[in-house]
Image (cartoon, rainbow, N blue to C red):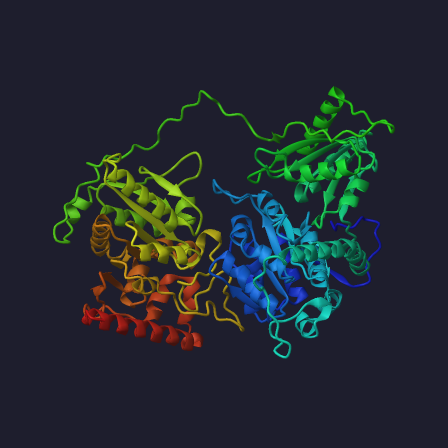
Amino acid sequence: MNVAALDQPRGTLEQRVFLGNGNEAVARAILDIGYDAEGYYPITPSSDAGEAVSKAYAKGETDIAFLVGTSELAAISICAGAAVAGGRVVDVTSANGLLLKAEQMPAIAGLGLPMVLNLSTRDVSAPLNIKNGHTDLYAALGWGWLIFLAPNVQACYDMNIIAIRVAEAVNLPAIVAYDGFHTSHANRRIEVFANRDDLRNFVGPSPFKETLKGSNGRFSLLDVKHPRTFGPYMNDDLINTKVQLDLKFKEAHALIPKVFDEFAQLSGRQYSVIQSHGSRGADRCLVALNSAGEAAKDAVDELAERHEAVRVILPTVLRPWPEQEWIDALSGTGWVAVAERASQYGASNYLANEIGATLQRHGNNAEIIQRTYGVGGLNFTREDALALFELIDAHHQASPPARTDDEIPSLPFAPEKSYHGAWAGDPDYQPAPNLVPLTVEECTINEQMNGKVNLRKLSEMPVRFEKHTACPGCGIFTTLNLFLRGIDGHVVLLFHTGCGMVVTTGYPLTSFRVPYFHNLFHNGTSTATGVVEMIKRFKARGDLPEDITTILVTGDGGDDIGMDQLIGAALRNDPFIVLEYDNKGYMNTGAQLCYSGYKGQQAANAFYGPQQSGKRTHHKDVIEILRGTFAPYIATVAESHAPDMIRKARKAQATVRAGGFAFCKALSVCPLNWGMNEHVGPSAIEACVNACMHPLYEINHGITTITIDPEKSKKKVPVTDAFTKMGGAFRHLCDPAHADLAQEVQQEVDRRWQRLKELNDNERL
C-alpha cells in the first residue's frame, strides 16, 4: 500500500507499479534520479542496493560512474571527491560501515557537499550481528547531516528523491535511513515515476553546471577560471562555520515541508515531518521509528475498534530536529512511550532525551516511558505495540499526571529505562563443554628436520577446530586444517570478519579447540600486533611460560579493507602469521568483487554485459605488495599441494619464533559463488596453479624460490583451462566471443610468471 491515504487525490505525473524490496527501491531511485557517481563498498544488509545499480550499469541502462572502494572510508572519500568536483553523488552502507566512514562524515557536512547516503540500519557490533538496530543511525545525529526516515519500501524510493532535492538546495549531505532486513529485504508493490525526465525536472538540473555558476553558493573544484580552496586549515574562524551549518539546518527546516507538498502534487503521496496514525489528541501515544511504527499502526487500529483512543507517531525527519512539530504532535498527550531500537548505556535513550528536552522547553509535562526493543533484529509486531500501550496504562493507573493549567509545569517524567523483549538468563545454567582443549604435547608431533615433512606423522596431528556450518566444498577449512598441521604447540587464532568466522562461532557454540578472537573486518592485523606485544611482555616478565604462536586468518576481501594495517604489521615485523584464504570475493556479504579477483570475473557488483565485462582490473598481488615491506617470510600455498603448504607453514612458524612476520596466501574455492560443483575444488585449485594464475613460491629474507614449477613438470595449461573448472563466475571467459579478454588475462599471467622466474633465477633481484 502507498504511504498516501486511500482517499488521497492522485498526483499529476504518471506512476507505474514496481515490485521490489527496500534495497531495490533505493536502487530504482538512484537510477531514476540520474546520479553522476556512486561510491560503493559491500556490507550486509545494504549491499543489494549497490549491486542493482552495478547490474544496470553493465547492461547499459545507466552511465553512472559506479566506483568500488577498498573500504567504507574509501567509498565515502570517493563520494567527497565527486561532490567537490560538482557531481551528484550517492552511497549506501550499514552499521560498522557507517562508523568506518565517521572520519569523513563531518568533513563532508562542514564543506557543504550535498549527497545522499542510504543507511540500511543495522546494530553495531560486537558481538557481530547483521540484523536491524538503530545504533548506527544515532551515531550520525551530530555529524551535520540531514536525516530522513523511510518507514516502508515506498518511502525508500520517495525519500531518496526528496533528500537529494533538499540536500542540493541547502548544500548539506543527507542520510535516508530504512530498517535493515525488515524493510531492505521486504518485497512490496510500490509506485514509481513512469517518466524519468519528470522526476529529474523535480530534482533539478545537473549540479555541475550550477556549480560553475556558483548557484546557491556551491562551487566546483573544476572551475579553473575561478580557482578556490576547499577544506582549508582553520582555527578561530571554525566557530563561524558551525554557525553556517546551523543556518543551513534552519533553511532546510523551512524547505522540507514545501518539498513534501510539491512532491505530493506530482506523485499523490503526501509526507509530513512527523506522521501520526490514530486519534488526534489521544492521551496515550507511542513513538516508534520506521518499520516498528508501521507495525504499531495495526495495534492502534485494533484498540480503536475497542473504542480506545491512542496514537502512534512516526517521524520522517530527525535532522533538522523538528521541535515545533513535536510540540504540535504531542499536544494533549499525557503519556508517551518512546520505543527505540537502541540503548544509550548509562543514560536515558537518544530520542527520549530529545523529546523530553523539547517538551520541557515548551512547558509540556507529558510523562515519558522509555523502552529499548528489537536490538539485534528482533521483530516488532502488533502484539509488542499492544504491550507498550498496556505499559502506559499501568503507569497511568499508578501515577496519573497532574496537568492543571495554573500549575507550574514539572519536568517530563522518565521512568527508569528498561528493555522490551529481553529475557532473563538462568543463573544455575552450566553449559557442558563441547570441545576438549588441546595440550602442547598433542600438538607437538613433528620435529623440524631441515625443512623436511614427515607426512605419516602429520596425519596424527589433532585438528584445532571441529564442526562448522560452511557450504559444501568450501575451501577455507581444507586450507586451514592443512596449514595447521604444520604448526606445532599452542596456537591462538584471530579471524577477520568473513565466512571463516561466521560459520564457526554461532552463539552459544564454537568450533575452536584453541583460543580464538574475532575483531572487526579490517582490524585483525593490528589486533594481532597487540596480542603478540603482550606475549613478549609477559614472557619477558616470566608470567607466561607457554610458547604461543599467533595466527590471523583473513579472507573474503579482508586484505582490501585491511591492506593498510597488514602493511603496517609487516613493516613493524610483528611476530605472527597471517594466513589469507583468497576466495576472490567478498563472499560473506554476497559475492561482491574484491581486488584480488581475476579480470573478467563476474561478481554481484561487477556484472557482465554490453557496457561492462565483469571485473575491470587484473588481480591484486598481495605477495608482491608485501615484498616491498621486506618481511622475512612471504609465501603462496594451495590445498592441491599439501606437502608444499605444510613445509611453508613450518617455515612461517620458525620465522615467527625467531621474532619476525610471516604471510601465507592460499587460493581458496567458493563453490557457491564461483558457480561450481562442490567436489571440483581441489582440481580447480590445481588447474590455477598449473596455469600460473596462482604460482607457488616463497620469499625468504628477500630470496625468491619457485617451489612448484608447472613448466618443468610439463603440467602448464592455459588460463582458459582453469576458468573452465572454476565455474560460472569465470566460464564466460572461455567463450570464443570473449577471446580478447581471455587473451589479455593470459598475457598478464604470463608476464607475472616470467618476472617471477627471473626473480627465482637471480638472488640479487
* 703 left or right of 664 in image: left
Residue drawn at x 73%, y 43% as measured from the top left: 314
Quadrant position of residue 460: top left
Quadrant position of residue 404: top right
Residue placed furthest toward the left: 449
Instruction: Tell me if residue 413 can be seen.
Output: yes
Residue 630 in the image: state x and y as whole percent.
Answer: 28, 62
Residue drawn at x 47%, y 68% as measured from the top left: 614
In front of the other: 328 or 481: 328
Quadrant position of residue 108: bottom right
Residue placed furthest toward the bottom: 225
Residue 629 in the image: state x and y as whole percent.
Answer: 31, 61
Residue drawn at x 52%, y 60% as measured from the top left: 75
Residue drawn at x 19%, y 72% as measured from the top left: 762
Instruction: Tell me if residue 471 can be seen.
Output: no
Residue 83 in the image: state x and y as whole percent.
Answer: 61, 66
In front of the other: 446 or 112: 112
* 74 left or right of 641 in image: right
In front of the other: 608 or 93: 93
Q: Name the quarter where the C terminus is drawn.
A: bottom left
Residue 435 in the image: state x and y as whole percent.
Answer: 32, 33
530 in relation to 221, above or below:
above
Q: How many marks?
A: 0
* 695 left or right of 735 in image: left
Residue placed furthest toward the front: 236
